[in-house]
Image (cartoon, helix red, strand yellow):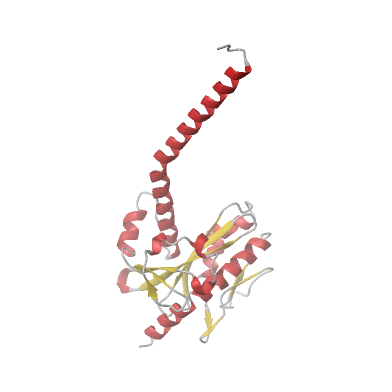
Amino acid sequence: MNKQGNAYTFIYAAVMVVVVAALLAFVSQALKPRQERNEMVAKKIDILQSINVAASSADAEQKYADIIGEHSYIVDFAGNKVEGVAFDVDLAVELRKPAEDRLYPVYEAHLEGGEKKYVLQLRGAGLWGPIWGYVAVNSDGSTIYGATFGHKGETPGLGAEIEKPVFQEQFVGKQIFDQGTFKSIAVVKGGADAEDKFEVDAVSGGTITSKGLENMLSDFFKGYESFLKNLERASHE
């Protein structure tokens, strides 16, 4: 075959494309288990952070096993437990469903002294991509014990500030219900009242991200409302 001809060039390029595609597919498949494990560990670190437990990739799995272990489940909009594995729920998929049809993961943390916290998983939309969070609630079903938030692609120094401790710490002690009525948490631009149990300061310069986070909180707290009210009733029995 004439190596200077167009046919040779076309065949050579086609073969190289196939070879490179095959190599990339092989590498992707080979790395997939490691990528999935890294995602799982990162998720456990976030869940633990919401209950104020520091963890690293080296010890997150053990701490998660000790504090939460098998005490996780899924609830529906009515607050009833349903079949399935909480860790396997994809909130990106659930978010596309009506709130009444979604699956809501709950991670029940057992802290020292028998104290229980309930970690709720949330997901919403920021300026440039999805935002998500884990909010830990006391056994009264209303008081926030801790929170952690993450994002994909928010602007550094602006919307990305939702993942900083100084923002997340504001949520500790805030309330989801006002005398039994669902209220959620407002993310206030220009300065929240520190004494107000239902608002926190917005991210400076991150108006759209802050609004997206506020909407995410309201949307998913509403989905967990029946479950949280069940907790509140149980705490008074």
* Left or right: where 53 falls relative to 174: left
Visible in this render: residue 148?
no
Give the quarter of the image for residue 127.
Answer: bottom right
Closer-to-camera residue (180/122): 122
The residue that appears at 63% across and 18% down in the rendered structure is: 6
Q: Is 186 rendered above or below residue 17? A: below
Q: Is 141 rendered above or below residue 153? A: below
The residue that appears at 31% across and 69% down in the rendered structure is: 112
* Residue 106 image point, x, y percent: 41, 69
Closer-to-camera residue (65/121): 121
Q: Is 226 rendered above or below residue 132? A: below
Q: Is 217 rendered above or below residue 18? A: below
Visible in this render: residue 105?
yes
* Residue 48 image point, x, y percent: 41, 61
Quadrant containing the N terminus in the rendered view? top right
* Residue 77 image point, x, y percent: 47, 76
* Residue 186 image point, x, y percent: 61, 73
Closer-to-camera residue (47/3): 3
Give the quarter of the image for residue 170.
Answer: bottom right
* Number of numbered discs visible in the structure rendering: 0
* Left or right: where 58 falls relative to 46: left
The residue that appears at 51% across and 75% down in the rendered structure is: 100
Quadrant containing the C terminus in the rendered view? bottom left
The residue that appears at 42% across and 35% down in the rendered structure is: 26
